[in-house]
Image (cartoon, grey):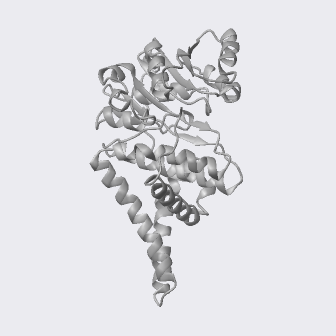
Amino acid sequence: MLPNFTSSPQVIQQSPVSIVIAAKNEANQLKKKLGAILQQQKITTEVIVIDDHSTDETFQVLQEFQKKYTHLRIYQLQDFTTKSSKKIALTKAIELAKYEVLLFTDADCQPVSQLWAYHMLQTLHLHSKNQIVLGFGGFKKKPNFLNRLQNFETLQTAIQYFSASLWNIPYMGVGRNLMYKKSVFLENQGFEKHLDLKSGDDDLFIQDVANSYNTQVGLHLDSFTISSHASSWKSWFRQKRRHVTTANKYSIWHKLLLGFSFLMKFVFWIGFLVLLFTSFWTTSLFMFSVVMTTEILIQKSIFKHFNEERLILGYPIYNFCLVMFQFCIFSINLFSTPKHWS
């Protein structure tokens, strides 16, 4: 169920927002996506884009946008003696931000609406204690299996971290769509606790600062962002390997919850496949039907709300492929370290 949006429009309009983006070699994406971010309506915004040591025309593209949009502020990191890091770029952007409310997204993301920032801010103002809003960042829809599986994985992940927040145990957000107050960042020394790690500017930071009373989830359809999906299995696999490297820094409680959730899914599928080739195959099929039907019925309204009804029909297939895909990632990451934003 959607939250009851009762915030005063006047209060929201009087709360300006600094939209923050760290871009590295994103000239082509910025040409396509930045305009939609710069054209947000109903509230005052500034857009801060940090060029993180790009070697393409990223900064030149930003300079062209700045000629048209006076509320665009750009900065170029050029100190090549310092190892590049997205966290350094984001920290610089936050230092430059004029406003208390910060809204983060990526250079390859585009809001679904010109009211994206407005609705994220509206969610923040649902309660005076709110300091953080966890948003949803999906992927563009394409008529191929890889894209469907990526969207399925993204939605399942969102269900997990949204549910955890609603159960008062928030543990992560996604940098594609995340809002928090500048004072929260400064009071918690920013990314200092995990500055040595390339990842974690979203999930680990949220673990540091989120609690049972200061975090909301952005469920309004106009508060979503959309990204370009990985174009190949190889690039998606590499991307997900990077994302899970921060998992060992999660709290013991969150590790147990997430680990148990994955273990149950893995055991279910292995058990089903093994029993399918035994004399218990009818029981196996019956239990499979009960579990899958139950999960689909529970999640059907969620898929509908996120405009992903197309995934319901192939739910068992996507579920199985995702579990096996994640198992491969966890296994390979035990023996090698993936490359990060560099």
Q: Name the spot of residue 3 as percent of width and height, x first.
A: 42, 38
Residue 36, quarter of the rendered image: top right
Q: Residue furthest bottom?
A: 279
The percent position of residue 326, horizontal first and vertical second, equals 49, 57
The quarter of the picture where the C terminus appears is top right
Between residues 208 and 38, which one lies in front from this camera angle?
A: 208
Name the foreground residue: 196 vs 184.
196
Q: Position of residue 146 (x, y in %)?
A: 65, 54
Q: Is residue 38 above or below residue 246?
A: above
Q: Residue at x 52, y 49 (%)?
A: 155
Visible in this render: residue 166?
no
Q: Give above or below for 121 relative to 48.
A: below
Identify the residue shown where x is 58% and y is 22%. Answer: 53
Residue 299 against residue 174 in the figure, above or below: below
The residue lying at 35 percent from left, 59 percent from top is: 260
The one nearer the camera, 286 or 268, is 268
Name, please, the residue furthest toward the front.
81
Q: Report the residue at 61% width, 63% height from top.
A: 313
- The total number of labels drawn is 0
Residue 255's x, y, as percent? 33, 51
Q: Is residue 228 visible?
A: yes
* Res 114 quadrant in image: top right
Q: Is residue 51 above or below residue 113?
A: above
